[in-house]
Image: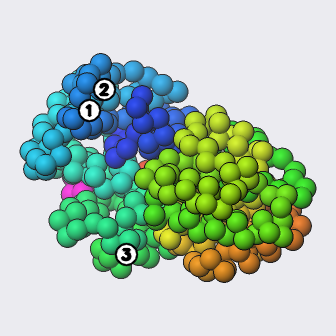
């Protein structure tokens, strides 16, 4: 057990109304708590003032608890989204209040780990006030799509400049961030939860295809449904499940009805973590058609159960699908997606090899040990340099 007091500041975190939001941040903190003496989270859950009645039982409430070894301080704060700068100011005031309550109970942390730049401003305040260094892991694929305006880019640049160590979740993402911000990043992938590694199963003929992700234009599930419709003409035994919720649900539903394949396509909706475990085990091939991905947790979860992958060449997954025995990376167009699925159907896959590859490279133990190594190096550097960080 490492004698480290680690504070994690996630930009998203699961809540009653958003159970899958930031789920990886929660799982990583709980895994680190198995190796580190004290792991804690401070998080401000925002919600629109227009949904105040829905959130009324939680509004302005501070929830303090300990779950799976992690001390959690979660505050529920309404926002008026048109008042951008007021919200930023209010966030700072609330965070200072939370941090003082936290330190009164647990003391000053040795180190802060930020997940995605929106929470970075709080880490900068801690650094300036208490001379505590912080690290950041960036996850947001919006940096790949030019979705952020210059104001947000400048805010992110300040966080990355102040950070003692910047991580990116894939090598592709790392290079993109370095080009955009002209600062160094280190590749540090997400890990797969141990439950998925325990779910390995040997598969035979591929009949059940799976897609996992938010239903939004970036994920391009419309291409998958069209490809699946074409493939059904020669492979009528196939079924497709799409797991996720989002703005494209109505469009995808209309496509399924238009192609008259409702008995072959299941739009599952949102799935819990326990449901996902069973879903992966009951399917044979993961097909992801995103335009951009910073990483792809669904890839390593599916592969942990032995499932091969067909994916568009969308960035982050190139750090996962590193050889043709693990999956097929295709061009981002309908013809290539169809050809790659057909190729995957004809190939005999070694499910054990796929599972073992994920266990070796993306296990909780492997990634936690790598992170702790960086924590210790940074703390040694801090001791040597005093408060110069």
Between circles 1 and 3, the one closer to the viewer is 1
Q: Is residue 118 magenta?
A: no
Disc 2 or 3, which lies upstream in sequence?
2
- Return the mark for residue 178: 3
Marker count (numbered): 3
Residue at disc 1, secondary structure: helix
Q: Which residue shows up at 65% across the image and 62% down it?
A: 259
Quadrant of the image for the N terminus? Answer: top right
Q: CA distance from mark 1 to mark 3?
A: 38 Å
Place of residue 280 in the rendered image (x, y in percent of width and height, measured from the top left):
71, 47
Place of residue 21 in the rendered image (x, y in percent of width and height, measured from the top left):
44, 42
In the image, which residues are magenta?
Answer: 385-389
On screen, residue 190 above or below 17: below
Q: CA distance from mark 2 to mark 3?
A: 41 Å
Q: Nearer the viewer, residue 341 or 171?
A: 341
Q: Nearer the viewer, residue 286 or 116?
A: 286
Residue 129 falls in image quadrant: top left
Neighbours of disc 1 within 10 Å: few (<14), some (14-19), many (20+): few
Residue that label 2 marks: 54
Q: Nearer the viewer, residue 242 or 74?
A: 242
Between circles 2 and 3, the one closer to the viewer is 2
Q: Are marks 2 and 3 in contact (CB under 8 Å)?
A: no
Neighbours of disc 2 within 10 Å: few (<14), some (14-19), many (20+): few
Residue that label 1 marks: 51
Q: Taken as a whole, is the magenta stretch helix, strand or loop?
A: loop
Disc 1 or 3, which lies upstream in sequence?
1
Q: Which residue shows up at 21% across the image and 51% down it?
A: 121
Left/right of residue 22 with respect to residue 295 in the rendered view:
left
* Picture colour scheme: rainbow
């Amino acid at each position: 057990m490492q004698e480290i007091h680690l504070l994690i500041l996630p930009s998203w975190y699961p809540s009653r109304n958003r159970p899958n939001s930031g789920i990886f941040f929660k799982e990583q903190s709980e895994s680190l708590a198995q190796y580190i003496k004290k792991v804690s989270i401070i998080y401000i859950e925002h919600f629109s003032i227009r949904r105040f009645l829905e959130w009324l039982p939680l509004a302005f409430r501070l929830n303090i608890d300990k779950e799976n070894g992690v001390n959690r301080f979660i505050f529920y704060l309404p926002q008026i989204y048109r008042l951008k700068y007021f919200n930023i100011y209010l966030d700072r005031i609330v965070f200072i209040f939370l941090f003082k309550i936290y330190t009164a109970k647990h003391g000053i942390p040795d180190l802060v780990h930020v997940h995605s730049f929106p929470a970075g401003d709080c880490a900068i305040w801690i650094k300036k006030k208490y001379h505590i260094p912080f690290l950041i892991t960036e996850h947001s694929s919006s940096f790949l799509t030019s979705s952020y305006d210059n104001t947000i880019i400048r805010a992110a640049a300040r966080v990355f400049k102040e950070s003692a160590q910047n991580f990116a979740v894939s090598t592709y993402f790392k290079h993109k961030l370095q080009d955009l911000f002209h600062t160094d990043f280190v590749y540090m992938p997400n890990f797969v939860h141990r439950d998925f590694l325990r779910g390995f199963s040997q598969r035979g003929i591929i009949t059940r295809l799976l897609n996992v992700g938010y239903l939004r234009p970036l994920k391009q599930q419309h291409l998958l449904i069209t490809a699946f419709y074409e493939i059904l003409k020669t492979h009528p035994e196939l079924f497709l499940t799409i797991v996720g919720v989002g703005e494209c649900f109505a469009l995808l539903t209309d496509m399924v009805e238009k192609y008259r394949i409702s008995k072959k396509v299941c739009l599952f909706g949102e799935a819990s973590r326990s449901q996902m475990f069973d879903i992966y085990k009951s399917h044979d091939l993961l097909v992801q058609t995103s335009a951009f991905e910073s990483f792809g947790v669904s890839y390593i979860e599916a592969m942990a159960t032995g499932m091969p992958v067909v994916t568009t060449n969308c960035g982050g997954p190139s750090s996962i699908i590193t050889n043709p025995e693990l999956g097929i990376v295709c061009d981002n167009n309908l013809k290539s997606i169809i050809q790659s699925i057909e190729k995957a159907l004809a190939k005999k896959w070694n499910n054990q090899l796929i599972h073992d590859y994920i266990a070796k490279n993306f296990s909780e133990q492997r990634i936690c040990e790598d992170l702790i190594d960086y924590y210790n190096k940074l703390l040694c550097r801090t001791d040597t340099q005093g408060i110069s960080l």
